[in-house]
Structures are given as structure tokens and as C-alpha cells.
Image (cartoon, rainbow, N blue to C red):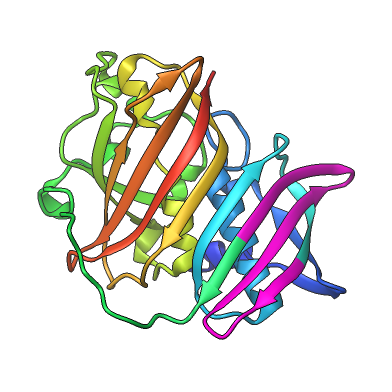
Amino acid sequence: MDDDIYDIDTSSVPRGDGIRDLTLTDRWNTPLGKPNGGYILAAMLRGLGDEMAADDAMVGAVTYLASPETGAAELRTTTLRRGRRVQTGEAALWEGDRHIAQLLASFGARTGRSIELGTPPDLPAPDDCINPKDFPDAMPASTIFDRVDYRLGAAPGWALGQPSGDPTFELWQRLAGGREIDLPALAFLCDSYAPPVLEIGAAQSMTVQLTVHLHRRPEPGWIATRLTTRHVINGFHEEDCELWDEAGNLVAQSRQLAMLL
């Protein structure tokens, strides 16, 4: 059953006229007791791509409009353009009369040359890293941590009650049990770990807007993750994420706007 949880919880059923039914489960809840924003984005991206019968997702920009609850939801999709190389659509997530999130996304085939100027995180091998699940007292209570395997190069200061002052995290991630990571799952992994602002003493953070660029499907294995925040202004902050596969390929990156709580 565990191998199927991601597929079940991100799936949606077409009803006709671009509308799809889905269920947001409590298996991806954050410490705030709400469905994780990356999980919501993955379900929306997958549903929109299925409805459009589109190529691979390339970019998705989601704005969160209301606090989500677990339970039945509705995805209202619209195809905006079907170009030769890029297909674009939008999707609105509704729970009853509450508009929860709005997504604009583009899909396309992977062609053309690649030039990489960046470098992946310099992490020990996953087997040589810390498994935070070995220290449950330092893990905030949330079900999302049952859905993802994490490996840390060093214990984060915030988990020890001693924030480092540097809002930067580098770690390995993968879906629980090593399940294959598709492109919507990469979007989820951009928002699946604790926010780095915890290292400057923030209590918690909530995403307002999230844009992900999905560059390629990863090679099987772990995903090296770099998370950074450099600006906290008027109670809001940015968070940048890079995801690299074990072969050293940049597979996704994101930027989000979030508010301190």
C-alpha cells in the first residue's frame, strides 16, 4: 500500500467539461495540521496535465488563496494554448465554495542542448548521513515526514534548540521507500522539508506563492536539495530551492514567497 500512496493521493477523476474530482488526504499534513503546499501543487499539476493530455510539465506557478482542508475537492481546468512546443493551461482548486489555489502551468517536449553552470550540494553519501527519523523528539509532529525519506549532512541547529543564524539547508530527499520520482513529485520535493528560516529563529512559515521549474526526470535514487533564504522583509521571505539527482543533474528549481507565522 505504501508504494501506492503517492499515486492515490495525487490522482483525480475526470467528470467532464474540464472538471476533475480529487481528495486531499491528511497523509501529507504539515506541522500546522494542513495539507502541504507542495503536495497540493503536485496533485494540481498531475490533474491538469492529464486533462490536457499534455507533454511533460515544465513550469508551474501556484498561488494559495485559502487554507486547505482535507477532504473532497474539485479541480477546474482550462486549456489556454496548444503550441507546437509548449502547451499551457490553468487549474483552480475548490473545496465547496472556497477557492483554495490557482495554478498556471506549461508543458512541453524536452529538446535542445543543455549547459550547466551550477554545482550540486557537497553532501556525504546518503548512507553516511543522519536520518532525522532516528531522533523523533526533534521532528515536528506532521504526517508529511512519513511520506519522505530525509538524510542530513549535519543536525540542523533549529532542531537542537540552537538556530545557526544561516538560513541554508542541504540534504538528501526521496519519496518514502525509494518510490520513483516523476515531475509532479519533483514539484512536491521543492516544498517538502522544513523552511530554512527556522535557522534564524522563526517559529514557522506558510507559502503564499510557489513557482517551480521542472528541467528533467531524475535518475533513480536520492535527490540532493539546497534550500536558501536571503531576504526577510516585513514578515515575508523568499525561499529558493535546487534539486539535483545522484548523477549530478539539476532536475528542478523553485522560488516561493512565504509569510512568517
Query: Vertically, is 231 above or below 250?
Result: above
Residue closer to the observer: 182 or 28: 182
Query: Vertically, is 10 above or below 55?
Result: above
**Residue at image coords 73%, 35%:** 66
Query: Vertically, is 97 above or below 108?
Result: above
Q: Where's residue 57, x and y in %?
A: 51, 70
Q: Where's residue 14, x and y in %?
A: 79, 74
Q: Is residue 98 magenta?
A: yes
Image quadrant assignment for residue 227: top left
**Residue at image coords 51%, 30%:** 258
What residue occupies the far bottom of the structure in this picture?
84
Query: Vertically, is 256 above or below 182?
Result: above
**Residue at image coords 58%, 28%:** 32
Is 69 displayed left or right of 97 in the figure? left
Q: How many marks?
A: 0
Q: Which residues are magenta?
A: 78-104
**Residue at image coords 71%, 75%:** 51
Q: Tell me if I can see residue 110 in this picture.
A: yes
Q: Tell me if I can see residue 9 in this picture.
A: no
Q: Is residue 34 magenta?
A: no
Is 188 displayed left or right of 168 in the figure? right
Residue closer to the observer: 254 or 28: 254
Predominant SS along the magenta part:
strand
Image quadrant assignment for residue 137: top left
Quadrant of the frame with the C terminus: top right
Q: Where's residue 249, x and y in %?
A: 23, 66
Q: Where's residue 43, x and y in %?
A: 62, 60
